[in-house]
Amino acid sequence: MNKTSVLIIAMSIFPLAHAENSHAEQRLKYDFFSAELTSGTMSGLYAAGKSDNTTALSIGVSHQLAERRVLLISDYSARFYHPNDETIEQYRLRFGAGYHWSIIDKLDLVSHARVGMLRISSDYTVDNETRSVFGADIGLRYLIRPDWEASLFAEANYNHWQDEYVFTLRTDYQLSKRLALGGLVTYRDGELQNINEVGITMRIHY
């Protein structure tokens, strides 16, 4: 085989390999660490006659099992309600699993189920209580561009104190191969209060 033939073969293979790598980069990613910082207003039992503010910080991890669509997840959150210059603290740790289905190119249907513990303390009670919490969600993730994603999720959480339904619209922009920053808007509908939140997000892919 002469040098010209080798060069022609190499030039033919390179575009195919590049196209395959580009396609891989355009897939939604499920291996990441995440962090969210949110703030919002609430109404209901915890509000002192009007909307009061709430802040929350959450961290989590998602891992996809090999080439399968099965996900392992975990998250921890700290939420602080501030009615009438008082503070109600809520700490939650959960573990769970999920699965994702490819609907069309760049659009996935995703669902998770979680179980964990929820602890609430406040200035109104002497004893802090810890109870079990169960939850599940379902949503859509769409890759608008290789570096830009949007998602919409609906989540149901159940615990001793109340049932809560959470709706989240989120967008993430990938600044580098590992780092993505974004924002979210969340509406929480509970038996005791309703909360509207906005926040900033961060993902570190691995």
Image: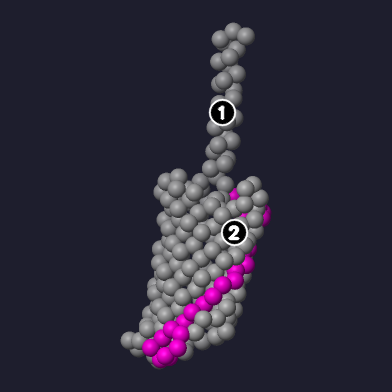
**Place of residue 132 in the rendered image (x, y in percent of width and height, measured from the top left):** 57, 78
Q: Quadrant of residue 23?
A: top right
The x and y percentages for residue 24 are 57, 41
Please name the residue shown 54% across and 52% down the image. 31
Any part of residue 145 in sight: yes
Q: Does 124 lie within the magenta span? A: yes
Q: Mark 2: which amino acid?
A: Leu
Q: In the picture provided, is 172 more to the left or to the right than 102? A: left
Magenta residue check for 122: yes
Q: Residues within 10 Å of mark 1 (few under 14, many from 20)?
A: few
User: Is most of the magenta stretch helix, strand or loop?
Assistant: strand
Image quadrant where one finds the N terminus: top right
Residue lying at 59% horizontally and 50% vertically, measured from the top left = 106
> Which amino acid, by three-letter code, is at mark 1?
Pro
Q: Residue 109 in the image: x percent, y percent?
A: 63, 59
Do the CB atoms of the residues marked 2 and 1 lie less than 8 Å apart?
Answer: no
The foreground one among 188 and 158 is 158
Name the residue located 41 percent from the left edge and 63 percent from the top edge. 200
Label 2 vs label 1: CA separation?
A: 35 Å
Q: Position of residue 50 (x, y in %)?
A: 40, 88
- Residue 56 image-quadrant placement: bottom left
Vertical position of residue 183 compared to residue 54: above or below: above
**Residue carrying label 1:** 15
Residue 151 vs 86, above or below: the answer is: above
Of mark 2 and mark 1, the one earlier in the sequence is 1
Helix, strand or loop under label 1: helix
Q: Which residue is mark 2?
A: 72
Residue interval drawn in magenta: 100-128
The residue most toward the top is 2
Marks 2, 1: nearer the viewer: 2
Q: Which mark is residue 179?
A: none
